Image (cartoon, coloured by chain):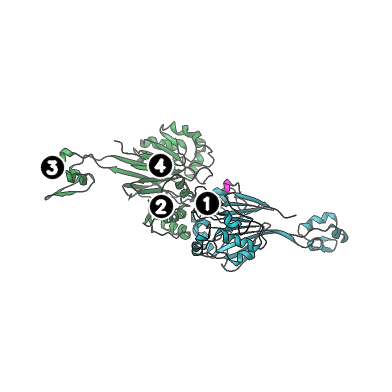
Chain colours: A cyan, B green
Amino acid sequence: MIDVCLLGTAGMVPLKDRWLTSFYLTSGGHSILIDCGEGTQIAMAEASCRLKPIDTICLTHFHADHVAGLAGLLLSMGNAGRTEDVTVVGPPGLAHILQCLLVIAPIPFKVLACETDGTKEMSLNCGDMQIEVFPVEHVIPCLGYQITMPRAGRFDPEKAKSLGIPVRAWSVLQGGEPVKIGETLFTPADVLGPDRPGLKILYSTDTRPCETIVAYGRDADLMVLEANYPDDEKIDKARQWGHMTFAEAAGLAKAAGARELWLTHFSQSITDPKEFEENATRVFPNARVGVDGLKKTLNFQD
Amino acid sequence: MIDVCLLGTAGMVPLKDRWLTSFYLTSGGHSILIDCGEGTQIAMAEASCRLKPIDTICLTHFHADHVAGLAGLLLSMGNAGRTEDVTVVGPPGLAHILQCLLVIAPIPFKVLACETDGTKEMSLNCGDMQIEVFPVEHVIPCLGYQITMPRAGRFDPEKAKSLGIPVRAWSVLQGGEPVKIGETLFTPADVLGPDRPGLKILYSTDTRPCETIVAYGRDADLMVLEANYPDDEKIDKARQWGHMTFAEAAGLAKAAGARELWLTHFSQSITDPKEFEENATRVFPNARVGVDGLKKTLNFQD
């Protein structure tokens, strides 16, 4: 299972009652944080999301509202007792940006820059979660993130018995490791059925609608997408600044066949984003307007 | 008059219910901000302190809790319509720090770095407020700030009449400008009494007690001092990390003969700083524990 929390829902400027957009995922003691604007560490404290287990920080792009909280967050992770390396993923230029931002922050652990080339996809792991990085379309290079948790096939005890594998070795094979019985090496494939559907989450902010989001979001359990502008009246602004409307984000979730959509990254001109929810649900009924601290536990389906 | 607001009272880490320490002063449409940690721009919004009039930002030092909010604040000042230059004052290395921090922030006005040499005093103006910068004693180079508003002497109408200065010229001289009557040049000194006491505010955080604070705080109307640790049990930590206890801060206000003292920059280990107020008032009765958003209007005394 993966626990997720939408830490904030503001775009561009942190407001008195709305933290900047960022997203926290945690599973089996490993956590991923996507984006880290000014105040994200406070939003995490409010939502009771722990700092120390963050192994990977994924940055969509280098606008201040997505990255200005990084130095403070890493310092606070150090204060929380973190000593292990932390990987930061981001668009081209990441190493230089980190060098600059951390000039005010003596971090007591290694910060590893994992820089994409800005056009191609990239994969990495965080515990049992797998992260796929892909380009989206903003006014500067920007990345979307797909997080999946694969799930092995069902264990077949009859097959294990017929192969003469003793019961004490079953859990090893179920756990994905091979086991040697006498002279014979058995692999998980010998006793597991075909892979079962795992979990898939897609996160993308600061982008126009684009094909990569639909492709990576295919059949996602949850999509978290920006919806900076409420309606079509703002479509010119959305195009100019590389953002989406509520309806455009909903259109992507529909095209991808996602189960659920959370909207976020609302323009400060929107006082109550909930008022415009129908602009999204008309297109994709299982859309909802995100609120700061919105949480969900995603479980395998059977 | 000068309006002041203590925007936050936390040290090191922004908390759910405590913004990082920073201080806002405004007079006649010109504002000074001292320090700008993560979240300061949100604290300003909560306290209804305006972004746009900030002409001068004074940084005590380059630890993240005093400077990590700078990029976001300057961006928001731009969004608020600021186009005029902004001066940033700070210890040696300021120009480099600004270059680094602003790598994520395309600021639509000039940011002028006013870098001290870290040991000597420096003066500059912000509207009618005069800023004196002086070194204090922290674990890295750190500055204290004295803000004064001088006040001219009382106008003497009998003297003006006896000198034959026509009434229409009185306000010019009262305003501090010379005026020519016939062939004679009259200066304000001709019609004004001796300078009267103006206003003086002293702000210093992240420091051990030191002589410069007492000297610059002499007879101050208000001192705002850090009190990171509540009592003498923590004196070793205070010495190690370059901070003060409640009693040490109060001792400086007493030695300076200040009128009033606000304490701030409380360690996160202090849940309720008010509980320890007596540790300061025992030494200096007019000390008070600061709270986020604490405001005061300082007026000339008669």
Indicate the quadrant where residue B280 lies.
top left
* Amino acid at circle 3: Leu
**Closer to us: mark 2 or mark 3?**
3
| Distance (Cα) linking label 2 and label 3 | 49 Å
Tell me which numbered mark, 2 or 4, is placed earlier along the sequence.
2
Q: Rate crowding at label 2 as few (under 14), some (14 to 19) or many (20 or more) other CA atoms within 10 Å.
A: many
Q: Chain of mark 1?
A: A
Q: Is residue B118 or residue B149 the one in the foreground?
A: B149
Q: Mark 4–mark 3 contact, CB under 8 Å? A: no
Q: Which residue is mark 3?
A: B163
Q: Main secondary structure of the magenta part?
A: helix
**Closer to us: mark 1 or mark 4?**
1
| Distance (Cα) linking label 2 and label 1 | 20 Å
Q: Mark 2–mark 3 contact, CB under 8 Å? A: no
Q: Which residue is mark 1?
A: A72
| Distance (Cα) linking label 4 and label 3 | 49 Å
Q: Secondary structure at mark 3?
A: loop
Q: Rate crowding at label 3 as few (under 14), some (14 to 19) or many (20 or more) other CA atoms within 10 Å.
A: few
Q: Which residue is mark 4?
A: B210
Q: Which residue is mark 2?
A: B91
* Amino acid at circle 2: Pro
Q: Secondary structure at mark 4?
A: loop
The image shows residue B301 at horizontal and vertical percentages of: 31, 36
| Distance (Cα) linking label 1 and label 3 | 64 Å
* Amino acid at circle 1: Gly
The image shows residue B261 at horizontal and vertical percentages of: 41, 37
* Amino acid at circle 4: Cys
Q: Is residue A4 or residue B152 the one in the foreground?
A: A4
Q: Chain of mark 4?
A: B
Give, as a single range, the part of the protein colored magenta. A44-48
Q: Rate crowding at label 4 as few (under 14), some (14 to 19) or many (20 or more) other CA atoms within 10 Å.
A: few
